[in-house]
């Protein structure tokens, strides 16, 4: 991943996470600094998705200038895959775990800016 893309992705994530722009779709885990959760609905067929279901992915596409003028329903699934691919390609973002329940899936990632893992206790 190019340095400019890395900075763009980190800035996109931190700004969205700090502002809670996407609600429960993209959230910081408060007890684990640098760790966030990407909540995905398991719609199966992306033709049933609404624009709000894919807001995180489409906003990433808009930032990368890949958003079509008139998106078709299948676009949302492709957009989600591009976003997940960007996360997985980044050297500064590490996959931690995933959890599935009926109707949703949570994927946990860590932003590794200083190479350290800090845990907090309640």
Image (cartoon, grey):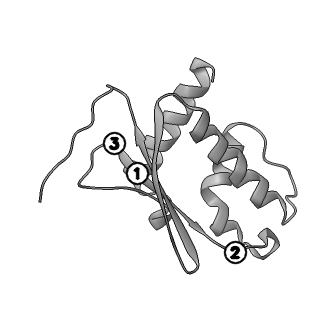
Residue at 55% from the left image edge and 27% from the top image edge: 6
- Kindly report the distance in space between the C-alpha atoms of the residues bearing marks 1 and 2: 22 Å
Based on the displayed image, in which of its 4 quarters is residue 5 positioned?
Answer: top right
Q: Is 33 left or right of 78, judged from the image as shown?
A: left
Q: In the rendered view of the protein, which quadrant contains the C terminus?
A: bottom left
Residue with the mark numbered 3: 34
Q: Is 67 left or right of 15, judged from the image as shown?
A: right
Vertical relation: 87 (above or below) 2: below
Q: In the rendered view of the protein, which quadrant contains the N terminus?
A: top right
Q: Is 119 left or right of 101, judged from the image as shown?
A: left
Q: Which mark is residue 36?
A: 1
Residue with the mark numbered 2: 43
Mark 2 residue element: loop
Q: Earlier in the sequence, mark 1 or mark 2?
A: 1
Q: Nearer the viewer, residue 105 or 54?
A: 105
- Kindly report the distance in space between the C-alpha atoms of the residues bearing marks 3 and 2: 28 Å
Label 1 close to label 3 by CB (< 8 Å): yes
Mark 3 residue element: loop
Vertical relation: 106 (above or below) 59: below
- Kindly report the distance in space between the C-alpha atoms of the residues bearing marks 1 and 3: 7 Å
Q: Position of residue 89 (x, y in %)?
A: 61, 33
Based on the displayed image, in which of its 4 quarters is residue 55 positioned?
Answer: bottom right
Label 3 crowding class (10 Å Cα cut-off): few <14, some 14-19, many 20+?
Answer: some
Residue at 52% from the left image edge and 40% from the top image edge: 12
Label 1 close to label 2 by CB (< 8 Å): no
Mark 1 residue element: strand
Q: Position of residue 111 (x, y in %)?
A: 41, 37
Q: Residue furthest bottom?
A: 102
Q: Nearer the viewer, residue 105 or 59?
A: 105
């Amino acid at each position: 991943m190019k340095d400019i893309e890395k900075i763009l992705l980190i800035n996109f994530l931190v700004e969205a996470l700090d502002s809670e722009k996407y609600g429960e779709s993209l959230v910081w885990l408060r007890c684990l600094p640098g760790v966030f959760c990407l909540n995905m609905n398991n719609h199966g067929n992306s033709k049933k998705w609404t624009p709000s279901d894919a807001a995180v992915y489409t906003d990433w596409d808009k930032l990368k200038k890949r958003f079509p003028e008139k998106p078709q329903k299948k676009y949302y699934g492709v957009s989600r895959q591009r976003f997940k691919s960007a996360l997985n390609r980044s050297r500064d973002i590490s996959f931690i775990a995933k959890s599935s329940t009926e109707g949703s899936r949570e994927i946990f990632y860590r932003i590794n800016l200083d190479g350290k893992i800090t845990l907090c206790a309640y």
